[in-house]
Amino acid sequence: MAGKFWSWLFDLDDSESNTEQENRTENMPQVTTAQASSGVRTTLQDAENFIAELQSYYYNDLQKMRTDLLTQTLSASDEKFINKKIKQDSVVLSQIDEILASVREMQREYHAIWGKSIYSFYNEIEKAKLKIVQEKVYKIIIRLCEVNTKQELENIIISRIEKYKEDWNISEDIKLPKNYNAVLIESNNGIEKYRFGNFYKLVKEGSNDKVLTSKQLKQIREISFEFEDRIPTNNVWVYVADATRLQLNFMRRTCIINKTWEYKSEDDRDLYFDVVSLEDLEQYLKGILQIVLSKKTYAIISIVIPTNEMLRFIGQIEQLGDKVKICRKYRFILQERSGVYGNNLLTLRVDRRHIHKKLKFLSYLQFRKLYF
């Protein structure tokens, strides 16, 4: 016994030392059982490294675009497009920086708890604390889904997050956030093409367009839309106009003011609504708001609920793919002012400077009473 004691004390017995080391290794929280069966490591350090790789991907892309501006002969339109993409990706990069900083902070907290757990024999209390930190890290990491704007990274991010969820035993109640970003993908002769979800929009290039800040994008993502009553139809018709403070006066007479942000031919003065399913309505509204609020201070959203009663009021229409044309435009506007549409025509105003978390659609008479 004495010999074993001294050999253990001075680390002379390799078998004893190795056994103790193996026991410690088995208890290390960074090592997971699923790690051996897959090539993807899921420690907190690896999660941090993954975010750092995404950060480098965006940074290298930004540097490439800046180099193109300096070294290549580009048209004025291409220069504007690249400059706008640089600004857009810079905002995304700043959001990834925030996510990475938060994960590093959580990792320090995790290691501090792990250090204490060694001396307390890794009891159940410490295990619970480590589990809580892991859940916090997971909630931070899933924000990558909502800030990413590069389509080629979507599946990579989702698959990695699902791996973390599986190996860390994260609750099923924590859902992945949706991506509501409106991403500029093309620009040609003053016409820009944006993608948000499954929607695409052709937009006029503005001379004073602004890039929304990280805070404004977060506020738009967190908006909760409310309606006065339950919508009885599967689809709605949506019209989104942009306005300045002076243009708001037009809404004393109608909310269907002219769009200056969406591209259409100069001779086309007809009234068109986008047909959107209720399932995709939130995606559509949050994507459109990002585009419109980069053009003007206010966005005015009008929604038609195409019930049978509403269709009788509107009269003749033409269905053109994902759009509906109102054939009698001025009659439609006149009846809006009189309030005969009731809750079948709802309106909402969004101010870029003060984006509220809850926004309620109102009938036109209620809307006018509230704002005028």
Image (cartoon, helix red, strand yellow):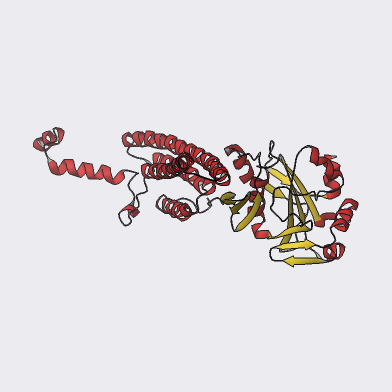
Q: Residue furthest left?
A: 3
Q: Residue at x 32, y 38 (%)?
A: 121
> Which quadrant: the N terminus?
top left
Q: Residue at x 41, y 53 (%)?
A: 163
Q: Quadrant of residue 201?
A: bottom right
Q: Position of residue 181 (x, y in %)?
A: 58, 49
Q: Position of residue 288 (x, y in %)?
A: 66, 50
Q: Quadrant of residue 87?
A: top right
User: Is 113 on the left or on the right of 349, as rendered?
Assistant: left
Residue 6 vertical placement versus 298 (above, below): above
Q: How many marks?
A: 0
Residue 173 vertical placement versus 113 (above, below): below
Q: Position of residue 8 (x, y in %)?
A: 14, 36
Q: Quadrant of residue 129?
A: top left
Task: Looking at the picture, tell me which residue is in the foreground, 146 or 35.
Answer: 146
Q: Position of residue 338 (x, y in %)?
A: 91, 52
Task: Looking at the picture, tell me which residue is in the foreground, 265 or 257.
Answer: 265
Task: Looking at the picture, tell me which residue is in the foreground, 196 or 100.
Answer: 196
